[in-house]
Image (tube, rainbow, N blue to C red):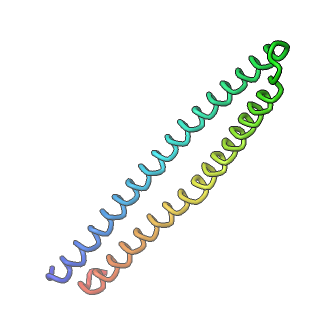
Amino acid sequence: MGVLSVLYVALAISVFVLAIAVTVMLYEVVKSVKRLTDRLDETLRQLEITAEDFRKTNSAVRGVVANVDYAAANFAHLTDGVKHLRGAVDVATKVIDRSVSPALIGFAGGLAGLKAVFSSIAQRISGNS
């Protein structure tokens, strides 16, 4: 085996290892984003429950306090804002699921293709086809 063949084999192995490392790294990024999204979703749910509890309390005190209608409208606005924010989080999660995952697959496939090209070139040069 010539020096050039060893170089091509080493290059093919390094491309393969790089593809695996990048794939693992991007998979961990996707997992971290999913965990963050889950935590944010749970926090928003708790905030929505708290806002609903405040609205119920305000409706019970309505007969005593003169300006409770104004406060209830503010809490309704807060709850609607939380619901809209949850919708935005759901959209962001769908975008990540539908764009990052296919990009990872395409990137890994491209790196595997590069490995195959370099292996083929190395085999042709060394005459081991």
Along the horizontal axis of the image, is 122 left or right of 70?
A: left
Res 60 quadrant in image: top right
Q: Quadrant of the N terminus?
A: bottom left
Residue 32 vertical placement versus 23 (above, below): above
Residue 45 position within the rendered picture, expressed as x and y whole percent measured from the top left: 64, 31
Residue 114 vertical placement versus 75 (above, below): below
Instruction: Name the residue at 46% across, 66% down.
Output: 107
Residue 110 vertical placement versus 46 (above, below): below
Res 83 quadrant in image: top right
Instruction: Name the residue at 38% across, 53% down.
Output: 24
Along the horizontal axis of the image, is 63 left or right of 53?
A: right
Instruction: Name the residue at 31% across, 81% down.
Output: 129
Along the horizontal axis of the image, is 29 left or right of 123?
A: right
Res 96 quadrant in image: bottom right
In this view, the residue in front, 56 or 48, is 56
| Residue sitting at the far front | 66
| Tally of marks | 0
Residue 128 position within the rendered picture, expressed as x and y whole percent measured from the top left: 27, 80
In this view, the residue in front, 3 or 124, is 3
Instruction: Name the residue at 66% across, 50% down.
Output: 91
In this view, the residue in front, 84 or 117, is 84
